[in-house]
Image: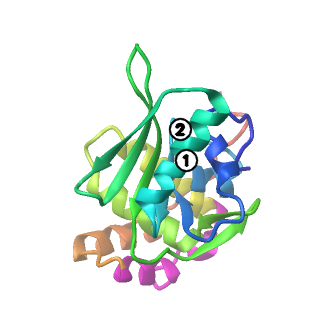
């Protein structure tokens, strides 16, 4: 679930319980839905009050773990990054994106997590934008795991298409979605080596 094997990076999930001003997205959201979670170093959040939330999270982590934590503004207030300050190099713990409205979400373990169709659409967009870059591999993996978990959404005219259109996706992204829908995605065999 959301906070198995809890460390610095997942304690914010506990902090987010019962809140209505923030939604988990990205890898941690994928992990909340799929049977085989993947490692990730940070938590990605969307909030209608990002600057206040990131400061609350910084204070929470500093008080809970006695760590040096700093916030960096990204793209003139469009988002914030919370880092653990370390001699060997800062560790990115949390990314908080400012949004006007929260995306569709459902509560899992008392935390709002981006709804499956929204999450799949966001992964299609990320995969398209990062093609040819190392992170596109994790986007593809997340996308296929979500589609195996929610096969009813792997249809051209599903909720995913609506989410892509609402996000303002261009024709190339919509074409990528159509290609993914047509592609056969198979579950891995646990007996393979």
What sort of colour scheme is used for the picture? rainbow
Q: Position of residue 92 (x, y in %)?
A: 43, 35
Which SS class for mark 1? helix
Kindly identify which numbered label has been placed on residue 121.
none
188 versus 20 height, above or below: above
Q: Position of residue 15 (x, y in %)?
A: 66, 51
Q: Visible in this render: residue 123?
A: no
Measure the C-alpha gap from mark 1 to mark 2. Answer: 18 Å
Depth check: give the residue in front, 172 or 57: 57
154 versus 137 height, above or below: below
Depth check: give the residue in front, 175 or 166: 166
Task: Reply yes or no: does residue 190 show up in magenta.
Answer: no
Q: In this view, does 168 lie to the left or right of 46?
A: left
Query: Mark 1 or 2, which is nearer the eye?
Result: 1
In the picture of the structure, the residue carrying the numbered disc 1 is 57
Q: Position of residue 158 (x, y in %)?
A: 51, 82
- Identify the image quadrant of the C terminus: top right
Depth check: give the residue in front, 63 or 128: 63
In the picture of the structure, the residue carrying the numbered disc 2 is 40
């Amino acid at each position: 679930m959301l906070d198995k094997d809890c460390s610095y990076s997942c304690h914010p999930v506990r902090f987010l319980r019962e809140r209505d001003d923030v939604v988990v997205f990205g890898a941690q959201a994928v992990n909340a839905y799929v049977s085989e979670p993947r490692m990730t170093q940070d938590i990605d959040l969307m909030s209608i009050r990002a600057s206040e939330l990131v400061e609350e999270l910084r204070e929470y982590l500093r008080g809970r773990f006695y760590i040096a934590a700093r916030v960096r503004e990204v793209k003139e207030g469009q988002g914030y990054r919370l880092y653990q300050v370390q001699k060997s190099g800062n560790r990115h713990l949390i990314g908080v994106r400012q949004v006007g409205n929260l995306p569709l979400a459902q509560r899992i373990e008392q935390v709002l997590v981006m709804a499956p169709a929204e999450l799949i659409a966001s992964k299609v967009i990320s995969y398209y934008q990062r093609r040819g870059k190392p992170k596109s591999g994790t986007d593809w993996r997340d996308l296929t795991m979500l589609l195996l978990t929610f096969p009813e959404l792997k249809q051209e005219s599903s909720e995913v298409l609506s989410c892509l259109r609402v996000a303002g996706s261009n024709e190339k992204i919509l074409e990528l979605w159509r290609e993914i829908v047509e592609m056969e995605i198979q579950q891995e065999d646990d007996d393979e080596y």
